[in-house]
Image (cartoon, rainbow, N blue to C red):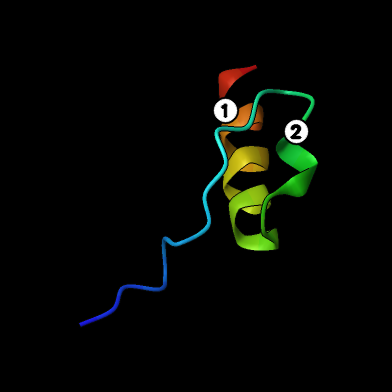
Amino acid sequence: MTLSEHDVHLWADNGQQAQVSSAVQAVLDTWRQTAA
């Protein structure tokens, strides 16, 4: 069995978060709205 979903990963700080997928960006946007 070969895993592929998590083959590419990035620990993204605030300056690198634009490099994530649109789905992850939506999660981050929601988190920012609730954290404010």
Quadrant containing the C terminus in the rendered view: top right
Judge by depth and name the residue closer to the eye, 24 or 32.
24
Q: Which mark is residue 19?
A: none
Asked whether disc 2 touches disc 1, contact meaning CB atoms under 8 Å apart, the reply is no
- Which residue sits at x=75%, y=47%? 19
Element under disc 2:
loop
- In which quadrant of the rendered view does residue 32 lie? top right
Residue 11 position, x and y percent, is 55, 33
Judge by depth and name the residue closer to the eye, 18 or 6.
6
Closer to the chain start, of discs 2 and 1, is 2
Q: Is residue 2 above or below residue 21?
A: below
Which residue lies under the disc numbered 2?
16
- Which residue sits at x=57%, y=28%? 34
| Classed neighbour count for the residue bearing mark 2: other residues with Cα under 10 Å, few (<14), some (14–19), many (≥20) | few
Outermost residue, bottom direction? 1
| Amino acid of disc 2 | Gln
Q: Nearer the viewer, mark 2 or mark 1?
A: 2
Q: Is residue 22 above or below residue 5?
A: above
- In which quadrant of the rendered view does residue 1 lie? bottom left
Outermost residue, top direction? 36
Element under disc 1:
helix
Residue 18 position, x and y percent, is 79, 43
Which residue lies under the disc numbered 1?
34
